[in-house]
Image (cartoon, grey):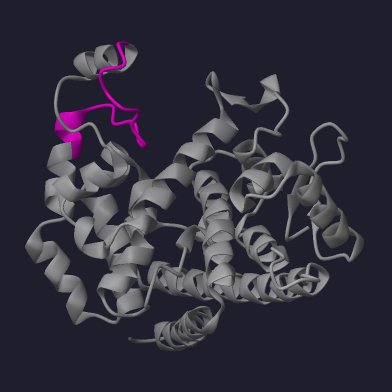
Amino acid sequence: MAGEAGPALSAAVDRLARLDERLAAAPPAVRRGWIAHMLLDEAAASATLDAIAVDADELRLQAVGALAADAERAVEGVDRVALAAGTLRLLRAVTARHPRQLFTANRLAAAARLRLKGRPGEIAAGLLQERLPPSLVEVPDPATARTALARALTPEAMARWHDLPPLIAAGGFLGHWSASGCANAVGGAVGRALVPQLLVRLGATAGPVLFPALGFRGHLGRYRPDRLLADESAMIAWLEACRRAAEVGLALHGRLSTAHQRLHAALKPVRSTGRGGLVADLLTETPAVTGAILAQRSGLSAAATRSLLSRAVAAGALHLLTRRDAFRVYGPLA
């Protein structure tokens, strides 16, 4: 790489390798909690790139039914948090799949439940009559989407990325996603959601750990996927965003690891049969939880659950995300 791209690539690769190593060595509860929190943050950041202003905390509260109704959240008649929640469901579906199950048009359509067959009117009728499961991504024109995906995900197109450094290839993939028409026909969020799994496919990471939209938080004007294939400055901006995204992941890993240790210390069982350790793990891996949800997942009584939650909050190991006495929501991170 000429000019400034070489140093930008080296810095991004260094941070990404560090993040991948730390997650590989982390306790399972920390890894699960890390991906849950990162997907919330990435969904909010990805929605922002699509001009939908959403905060990750709004998504956290919505997940447990604690987000108050607000008519001002509507964007063209649709709640903006609901729009971002669709991106979150997409991210969860894509990261749950093996990379081999994603990078053809049919496999991606299955993972994201894309409507690639039938006329738009017929699809709308099927949804209204509840004959079709809800799609994670609305495709206005299935025929155009099929054509665009066929261009973007051909075996020849996918093979070319193996000849490049993985982060350069990921940028090239997003550029090709845009140039093939997929960004318009299917959505830019779908292309961004594929990047973490593309890096796994290319052998750069052991699992999905780089979530690119986070790297453009505060740098929205530098996100230009339409220029990635031909403009070195756009590729440099991409690599710098990859570095920032990996740094966000490293910081989250540190915070969540500390929270995990504090929760285990606060909830250390008095008896060998106690479930304090189980509850500490559940709280670590869940961005937002209520007493009722925790009781259901842990198998504890409501009274025992309340006691453990009170102990964790009193020790400063758990945070109240809402202060309504009738409906308290807790999280491992403030």
Q: Is residue 260 left or right of residue 171?
A: right
- Per the image, is 41 magenta? no
At 50% from the left edge and 60% from the top edge, which residue is drawn?
222
Q: Is residue 34 left or right of residue 145?
A: right
Q: Residue furthest right?
A: 314
Q: Looking at the image, is 65 positioned above or below residue 159?
A: above
At 70% from the left edge and 33% from the top edge, which residue is drawn?
67
User: x%, y% of residue 176?
Assistant: 24, 58
User: x%, y% of residue 85?
Assistant: 52, 39
Location of residue 129 (image quadrant): top left
Viewer-proximal residue among 183 and 99? 99
At 36% from the left edge and 56% from the top edge, which residue is drawn?
96
Location of residue 125 (image quadrant): top left
Q: Looking at the image, is 243 positioned above or below residue 283?
A: below
User: x%, y% of residue 133?
Assistant: 31, 27
Viewer-proximal residue among 229 and 63? 63
Q: Is residue 196 left or right of residue 21?
A: left
Task: Inspect this view and state whether residue 38 appears.
Answer: yes
Location of residue 174 (image quadrant): bottom left
At 75% from the left edge and 42% from the top edge, which residue is drawn?
302
Q: Main secondary structure of the magenta part?
A: loop
- Per the image, is 136 magenta? yes
User: x%, y% of residue 24?
Assistant: 47, 81
Viewer-proximal residue among 297 and 162? 297
> The C terminus lies in which quarter of the figure?
bottom right
Task: Inspect this view and state whether residue 181 appears.
Answer: no
- What range is drawn magenta here? 129-145
> The N terminus lies in which quarter of the figure?
bottom left
How many numbered callouts?
0
